Amino acid sequence: MRPGRHTIGAAGGPSITRRQWLTGLGMGATAGLAGCSADDDSGTEATDDGDGTGSEPDGTPSVSGTYDTVIPSSFSTLNPLYNTGSRAGTAIGRTLDPGYTFNTDGEYFPLLYDLSTDDGGSVWVFDIREGLSFTDPYGQVDASTFVYQIRELHQTDWAATAASADWTGITVEETGEFQFQAELPEPRLLWPESYDPLLYPVPTDIVDPYVADEDVEGLRQEEALLDLSFTGNLGGYTLEEWERGAGTTYSRNDEYYLRDIGEGPELFSNAPYFEGASIDVVEERASRLAALETGEADSAGIPPERFSEFEQNPRVSTYRIPQPFNRILSVNMRDNGWNAGPGNLFRHTAFRQGLAAAIGKEELIAGIFRGLAQPHYTWQPSWSEWHPGDDAVTQLGTGDRYGGEVARGLVGDAIADSEFGYRFDGNALVTPEGETITLDLYHLAGGETSQLIAEFIGEELSDSLGIEVTIEAIDAVRFQQDYWTAAPQGGTDTVDGEAVSWDRPTPNNPGPRSVTSAESWDMSIVYGLNTYPLNPLTNAAFFDGADARYNPVGYYPEFDATGVFERARSADSEAALQEPFTELFQNLAEEQPYVMLAFGDELSGYTPDLVGPTEDFFNGWDFPAWYFDA
Amino acid sequence: MGVAGYVALRVGWAAVVSVIIVTVTFGLLAAAPNPSVQQAATQAALEGGDPQEAVERERQLRGLDEPLHVRYLDFLTGVYTLEWGWSEYRSQPVTTALADAVLYTAQYSIPWTILTVLFGPLIGVYSAANMYTWRDHAATGFAFFGYAIPNFFFGIILLLIFGVWLEWIPIVFRTEVPAFSLANARQLAIPVFVLVTGSIGAIMRVSRNESAAFRNATFMKTAKAKGVSPLRAYAYHVMRPTLVPLSTTLVGQLLAIFLGSSLLVEVVFGIPGLGRLTFNALVAQDTNLVLGSTLLFTFLAVVGNLLEDLAFTVLDPRISYDDREL
């Protein structure tokens, strides 16, 4: 099969195993929301039971050992139609390849099918690889397998599959035994990068009875889907057992289709290279790290405070893997924010810039992330293809744009613009009554890094602006319910001189700034968000106007955000996307809708004799080619 | 009332207790907000869907759109017909989930209980027999150490010493190991040791003090006068009356520490037992599984107390029911 998307080269996509389930299924932000963007040390881990011994006559490494991943929590389902969890995605991915992935250059790589478009992203053609088969008696994988799945499951109301939102309004049509096409309501040049067209094939014969009865419970609980007994030659391993609460074990699949595809790394020709694999649930972090240290696990996530210790440990190879989840200071621009005095200074762009300038990014990264993070100036990581370049964005909080003087200058602009009489008493900002400004700052309870960041922000704001910060720890669920979301009410407001109506309010943007959550709050670092570097258009959810779907802080863009996103949507080539994205990220760096702080690296440790891992966001895309060196 | 009547009464009371507990648990769960509904709304919003619709769908999926009394009655019927439903958190029937977890919990809790019941009183009586000697102090020190050190912490320390430094035991618990095998004994040795040291202290101290009262009792003097060996004297004449007050607290005490201790030890050693199952079911708000495990613990507590009362009468013939002669 001739791949049709080799030239896309979009940077910033997740590896197809665990991160694909985050970004692909819209869970990226949710994972960030759960506060695990930088503290998460739950990477993959493994056990080598074998001895790597030389190579095969064809030059490929010999098959040896078992690769056991250790994870901190168990999966709730392995049903590919309903899974939304990243860890279960890894567990499913061992036995069942998804449609496609992206290689370390960020290029599209077809697995089960290739995707191509020749009309600027309106109609996409799926070319399914021949020779793909389910376990007997379910037969081969062909176009009808996918078309049936999309039409009868994803596009129906009763089934409520994980991918249902991805297929709304799309017309699919079978155009050959191994080909079908999807017509989108509007062109999407970066459709594959959104992971929306990513499908996991399931046999029609298994789901057909449930389709006939519209039996969603039956479909969710179908044993053949839960134990992945249908996967045939579609994955590198076969699931032997899923012991709920303990994990999964796999045996090598000699029939793996990837061996015959004739593209990709040569190592695919005899893949996979482990005799078996398993994923063990070990909830205690100390135990997971102990397993990594003894070699009982081949890889594990490492918390920042122990990274340098493992760097010195010859029994472990350490990796810093960049990722797109950010650390931000959210400031509440709604009516229940800024409880220090009259008005709400957070609503002034210059004030938010002042906050960004007061918090030293390099100091934060050196002191709290121990150097294991990247500064965050605009809503893209610097390694993203769509990042406008360091020179093009204002780098608040670094170099000569960091410090009390710069911060006070910017805040001075803001208070001059404010109708209330805020002023500086010496170097300290005070209320019109001359009282100290006191703001609360919420952070995730139990998160050590989170608390340290909060304390650092408190000190910086105190030093530069004389603002007193009250630090409060809070549970993520409580913050989500009582602070971050509110009952959708809708309404209208004037934004940048124009009337805006909230016609489709959501819990995360319940209406104009007058619509507020149950509890008042000033600042928060509880949540980080995904910056979607692979397909930045997804960021429309955050910034496409004041009425964007996700806007808990009540940010009103002061640039033509809607127009910028409109231009990006109507771009007819990837080159044409660069201009609106550059404009978008320059403006976001300027306006600081969330005060941007840092991108923490994902920190992983692997056993030194494992060959395959890379310090790249796409690490793991070629997992079938990984092997143990002798 | 005879023993049979007494047991029947107790079983009847157990049924009432179970209804009360199930009702209270259901009430608490129904009153608690469901994060999965909120999460569904957030996700729908991010994906461009309608959050309200997503909330409705999620509520419908989880049966939360039914009136409360209908949900309660459905639930109650299911409980007493052993149809405990489907665990969303584990994607398997609740009864299967509980059976799986009990299997792993039993593998360490049976040796734990046996060793505690065996060694607690033995060390206590030994301590009493050697009161105020170095042996007594050593035994007391051991008891207090085990009682004082948190199981969670002790477990991690022992894992570090025996797992990481000495590499005598595996770090990751292997479920594929047969229950009766040396490999299983090896991976369970430290968890059992931690639990035994944690629970033996109180029992040892109570039995030490209880048996101290019988050291100089007249029946001991008689036994000594008749030339009975000290071992036999302590085993027959001191141990037995010592166990009477102990037996009233033993089961209750063990059950009380069962859930808490086993959860922490299961987390540290990665054992997929009842403690973790119950805790995770609570966190995930898996109603069926929470209720299932609540019922199981209720059953264990009720049966345990029943056995305790029966043991009481066997150990001390002076205790009888009103009409025991019947």
Image (cartoon, coloured by chain):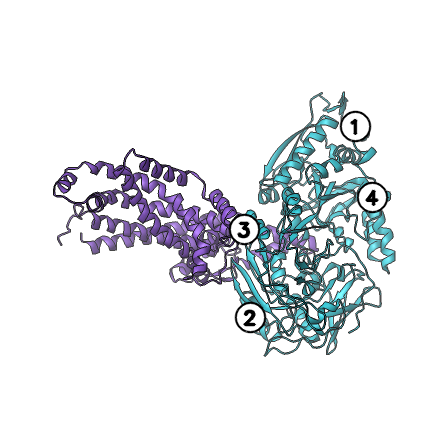
Chain colours: A cyan, B purple
CA gap between label 1 and label 3 equals: 46 Å
Badge 1 and badge 2 in a common chain: yes
Pick whichever of labels 2 and 3 is earlier in the sequence.
Answer: 2
Residue contact at pointers 2 and 4, CB within 8 angstroms: no
Above-or-below relation of A610 to A367:
below
Mark 2 vs mark 4: give the one in front: 2
Pick whichever of labels 3 and 4 is earlier in the sequence.
Answer: 3
Mark 1: secondary structure:
helix
Provide the residue designation for mark 2. Answer: A224
Q: Is A301 left, or right, of A581 in this rendering? A: left
Residue flagged by tag 1: what amino acid is it?
Answer: Arg
Residue flagged by tag 3: what amino acid is it?
Answer: Glu
Mark 4 vs mark 1: give the one in front: 1
Provide the residue designation for mark 3. Answer: A283
Mark 4: secondary structure:
helix
Residue flagged by tag 4: what amino acid is it?
Answer: Asn
Residue flagged by tag 2: what amino acid is it?
Answer: Ala
- Callout 3: residue from which chain? A
Mark 2: secondary structure:
helix
- Callout 4: residue from which chain? A
Provide the residue designation for mark 4. Answer: A587
Image quarter of residue A331: top right
Quadrant containing the C terminus of chain B is bottom left
Badge 1 and badge 3 in a common chain: yes
- Callout 1: residue from which chain? A
Pick whichever of labels 1 and 3 is earlier in the sequence.
Answer: 3
Q: Position of residue A525 (x, y in %)?
A: 67, 40
Q: Around disc 3, counting alpha carbons within 10 Å, would you say few (fewer than 14), some (14 to 19), or many (20 or more)?
A: many
- The answer to whether residue A342 is visible is no
Mark 1 vs mark 3: give the one in front: 3
Which numbered tag is attached to residue A408? 1
Residue contact at pointers 4 and 1, CB within 8 angstroms: no
